[in-house]
Image (cartoon, rainbow, N blue to C red):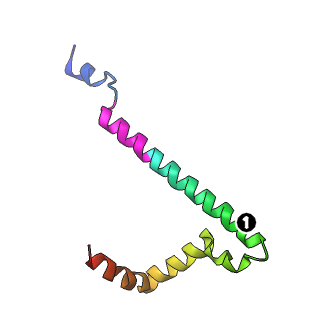
Amino acid sequence: MTALSLLAIPRPAPLALRHGATRLAMIAAGLGAIGLVWWFGAEAVAANPRTSAFADFAPGPTFSCLWLMVGSGEAWAMIAPSLSRI
């Protein structure tokens, strides 16, 4: 066998890499499930007239306000005291 033919032999991914990818996929699936529960819960809250005042806690308004806070620097001013304790 030549050196070039040895490079062409398919080898399975290292075990740690496969477990890392699986773990990453599980984390992403868990975060996605939490996001869906948050979204459906927020829709239920917004649909109920007695709890519609809390509709701004839905993912859409929350992330749009977060984006504005990060852009203005307000979020960093709030995060800095907490991070200084770590």
Give the quarter of the figure containing the N terminus.
top left
Residue 25, position as x, y percentages in the image? 46, 45
Check if residue 58 falls in the magenta segment.
Answer: no
The front one of 68 and 50 is 50
11 lies above or below 64: above
Q: Residue at x 62, y 71 (%)?
A: 60
Q: Would you say 55 lies left or right of 74 here?
A: right
Q: Quadrant of residue 15?
A: top left
Q: Tell me where the magenta segment starts and ends, as one range.
A: 13-24
84 lies above or below 5: below
Residue 41, position as x, y percentages in the image? 67, 63
Q: Quadrant of residue 13?
A: top left
Residue 62, position as x, y percentages in the image? 57, 74
Q: Residue at x 51, y 55 (%)?
A: 31
What residue would you read off at disc 1?
44
Residue at the farthest top position: 1
Q: Amino acid at mark 1?
A: Ala
Q: Quadrant of residue 11?
A: top left
Q: Secondary structure at mark 1?
A: helix
Q: Residue at x 20, y 21 (%)?
A: 3
